[in-house]
């Protein structure tokens, strides 16, 4: 029974990792840009949720869309003001550009929100469900289901809609897309907006059961990079699969071998997978 | 590459500064500069920021007249009378929770800022490296908070520590669990859960040793990394093993996660001990205080009755920080006051004289703002009069419950946790 609970807890945490990583993989898939500020986007979304609740008394039904909307605007702004320009520079400029943005956001958060840890009350999303002796935290369950929906939605949007085709066209060949009458700048700004909005949804949901602090993104971001790389850069379903896998591997190795070994296990398996499949689990070679 | 160059430059600079032509005591009117290295950003910034506020209170106490605090050395007058009324100045520096940064910041403060002494660094791991730099440059280092026993077993001559350490808490916790036994909570097995840097490792070792000496069985020992994003597996290990008592040696973010996860997985040990640090952080109490009702902690700090020295100091702190002073900040503040007192008695910022003055420190309990029996350093630099009390969380306040003669209310067991 305990072992089943370990696996279930691992799956729940894994779905959070997946949720958290979806925006990162989208930006990569669309633009081949690694957004090092991803974790700090999530952090901002968590603060949106926190302040929407404490200052305006808004519940998750209101603050999740609010965070998505605000982060959409932030994503577009970051693209227009920063990414568009550094994209013209060398690869290193892109990496350091988003890294600089990460530090800017993090230290602005220190300044604006203080270093204190804050949390939302546990009761916002119905506490804990007990199913046949298994304990499922409602907030994480909601987070996991949202991750699933978000993944499916994004996948359908990219593969089934003309908007998705246009986004992918720009990703594939900017010049050719321009010749087809697609405005690449507009498409890429949209991609950044959508990625940031999904990050906003993720952050607002994670705030329901996680502490909020200026450094919270730093802790989660490393896992997000592993998940995205393991799933295959740019593959949205891959991130979901990899997120769940990492969650379960972490939980089982921490339970059996001890908590200090879980990172060793995760990274060892990570390298092993990359050895056999350098493109990641679901990535295209 | 930049770092190496900078470090090399720093060491050349330090060599020049250390050459006889540059060595001089501060002139009477010069401010006495003290370096304070704390985690002002990074995952433990909430504790670091609180410590910064505490040291600024200490600075106010030393530099400005506070007749209502006259029991504390240097409080009544302004500045250091032993140095012609010189004011004290603190040069704060941020180590971000990183021991390597702590060390390079120590070198920078010594060689570039030319501080007379150093204090810090909250984390034992950072204190370890920063004090190693101070030892190399022969600069006095006073540690007010770092409690890993290993810090004072290095044979250092320039390292002084005012706080009680893991060996003290270990004995206190073990004695307390013996008492719990008498009070009808049979405690035979104990689980120790600790973060895996210097603090958690060294303190948990001391706790385990003390427990075993009292005949308690350690049924589970879980070291983990403090920046874990999930602790479910650890809580389920505890749930599976069912120890009679659990001791956590944790920082802030992880202690918050443990309480939330225990709540979600409905796990309550009969006795829960949280060793200071994370469990004392104001953020912890604010965030999950209502899930941790009845948690046992250690503390040397008690706000006391209105009008008392401790209560006045707490009000000064509250004005800056917006919340009551926690034990960690209070211990840091006391360490800084001890350092100022030594510099004052040395009558100079000459490092040998300050070292000698620290060695000669002899403060009594009523000259302190914290509940030690006094301050007197042993040959290893450890305060021999350091003492700790055990407190219990009640309605989001820690209240002294042990030893009995100091108890403000009787201890309530088992651990209550959350109410629903």
Image (spheres, coloured by chain):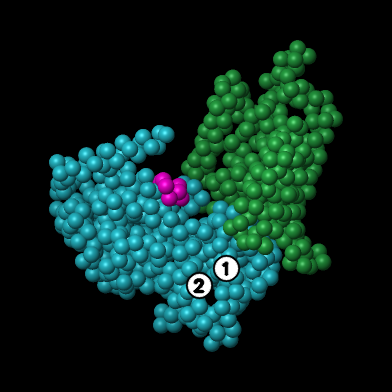
Chain colours: A green, B cyan
On screen, residue A111 versus residue B162, left or right, reads right
Residues B119 and B45: in front is B119
Marks 1 and 2: in contact by CB < 8 Å?
yes
On screen, residue B292 versus residue A9, left or right, reads left
Residue A143 percent across, percent down from the top left:
73, 49
Mark 1 falls on what kind of element? strand
Mark 2 falls on what kind of element? helix
Q: Which residue is painted at 31% across and 36% down in the image?
A: B9
The quarter in which the C terminus of chain A is drawn is top right
Furthest residue to the right?
A160
Is residue B200 highlighted in magenta?
no
Furthest residue to the top?
A179
Label 2 is found on which chain of the structure? B
Residues B35 and A230: in front is A230
Look at mark 1 in the image and give the residue it sits on.
B221
Residue B208 is labelled as: 2
* Label located before the other in sequence (2 or 1): 2
Mark 2 vs mark 1, CA separation in Å: 9 Å
Magenta span of residues: B93-101
**Residue A280 versus residue A121 in the image, above or below:** above
Q: Which residue is painted at 16% across and 48% down in the image?
A: B25
Q: Which residue is painted at 77% across and 67% down in the image?
A: A1
Residues A215 and A69: in front is A215
**Residue B313 versus residue B3 in the image, above or below:** below
Residue A242 percent across, percent down from the top left:
73, 45
Label 1 is found on which chain of the structure? B
């Amino acid at each position: 029974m305990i072992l089943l609970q370990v696996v279930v807890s691992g799956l729940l945490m894994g779905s959070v990792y997946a949720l958290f990583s979806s925006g990162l993989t989208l930006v990569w898939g669309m633009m081949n840009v690694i957004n090092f500020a991803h974790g700090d986007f999530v952090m901002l979304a968590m603060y949106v949720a926190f302040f929407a609740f404490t200052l305006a008394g808004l519940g998750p039904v209101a603050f999740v869309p609010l965070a998505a909307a605000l982060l959409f605007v932030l994503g577009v702004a970051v693209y227009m003001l920063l990414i568009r320009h550094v994209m013209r520079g060398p690869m290193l400029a892109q990496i350091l550009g988003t890294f600089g943005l990460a530090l800017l956001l993090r230290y602005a958060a220190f300044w604006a929100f203080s270093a204190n840890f804050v949390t939302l009350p546990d009761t916002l999303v119905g506490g804990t469900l007990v199913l046949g002796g298994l304990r499922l935290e409602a907030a994480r369950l909601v987070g996991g289901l949202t991750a699933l929906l978000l993944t499916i939605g994004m996948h359908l949007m990219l593969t089934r809609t003309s908007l998705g085709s246009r986004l992918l066209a720009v990703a594939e060949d900017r010049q050719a897309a321009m010749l087809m009458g697609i405005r690449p700048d507009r498409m890429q700004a949209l991609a950044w907006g959508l990625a940031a909005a999904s990050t906003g949804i993720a952050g607002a949901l994670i705030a329901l059961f996680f502490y909020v602090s200026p450094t919270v993104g730093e802790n989660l971001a490393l896992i997000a990079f592993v998940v995205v790389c393991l799933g295959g850069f740019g593959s949205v379903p891959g991130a979901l699969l990899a997120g769940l896998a990492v969650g379960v591997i972490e939980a089982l190795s921490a339970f059996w071998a001890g908590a200090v070994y879980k990172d060793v296990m995760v990274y060892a398996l990570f390298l092993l997978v990359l050895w056999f499949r350098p493109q990641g689990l679901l990535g295209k070679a | 590459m930049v770092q190496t160059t900078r470090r090399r430059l720093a060491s050349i600079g330090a060599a020049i500064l250390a050459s006889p032509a540059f060595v001089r005591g501060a002139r009477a009117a010069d401010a006495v500069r003290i370096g304070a290295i704390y985690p002002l950003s990074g995952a433990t910034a909430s504790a670091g920021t609180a410590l910064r506020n505490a040291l600024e209170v200490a600075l106010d106490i030393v530099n400005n007249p506070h007749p209502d605090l006259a029991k504390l050395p240097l409080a009544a007058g302004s500045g250091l009378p032993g140095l012609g009324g010189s004011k004290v100045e603190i040069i704060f520096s941020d180590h971000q929770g990183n021991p390597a940064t702590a060390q390079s910041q120590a070198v920078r403060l010594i060689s570039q800022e030319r501080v007379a002494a150093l204090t810090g660094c909250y984390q034992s791991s950072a204190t370890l490296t920063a004090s190693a730099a101070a030892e190399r440059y022969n600069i006095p280092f006073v540690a007010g908070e770092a409690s890993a026993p290993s810090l004072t077993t290095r044979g250092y001559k320039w390292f002084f520590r005012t706080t009680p350490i893991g060996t003290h808490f270990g004995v206190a916790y073990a004695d307390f669990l013996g008492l719990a036994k008498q009070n009808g909570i049979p405690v035979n097995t104990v689980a120790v859960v600790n973060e895996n840097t210097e603090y958690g490792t060294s303190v948990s070792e001391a706790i385990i040793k003390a427990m075993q000496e009292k005949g308690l069985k350690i049924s589970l020992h879980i070291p983990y990394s403090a920046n874990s994003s999930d602790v479910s597996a650890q809580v389920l290990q505890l749930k599976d093993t069912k120890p009679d008592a659990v001791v956590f040696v944790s920082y802030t973010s992880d202690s918050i996660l443990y309480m939330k996860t225990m709540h979600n997985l409905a796990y309550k040990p009969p006795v829960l001990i949280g060793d200071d640090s994370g469990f004392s952080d104001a953020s912890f109490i604010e965030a999950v205080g209502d899930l941790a009702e009845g948690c046992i902690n250690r503390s040397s700090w008690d706000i006391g009755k209105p009008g008392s020295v401790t209560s006045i100091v707490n009000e000064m702190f509250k004005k800056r920080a917006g919340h009551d002073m926690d034990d960690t900040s209070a211990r840091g503040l006391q360490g800084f006051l001890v350092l100022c007192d030594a510099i004052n008695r040395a009558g100079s910022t000459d490092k040998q004289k300050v070292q000698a003055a620290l060695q000669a420190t002899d403060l009594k309990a009523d000259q302190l703002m914290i509940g030690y029996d006094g301050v007197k350093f042993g040959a290893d630099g450890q305060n021999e009069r350091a003492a700790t009390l055990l407190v219990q969380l009640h309605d989001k306040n820690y209240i002294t419950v042990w030893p009995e003669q100091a108890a403000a209310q009787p201890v309530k067991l088992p651990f209550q946790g959350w109410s629903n």
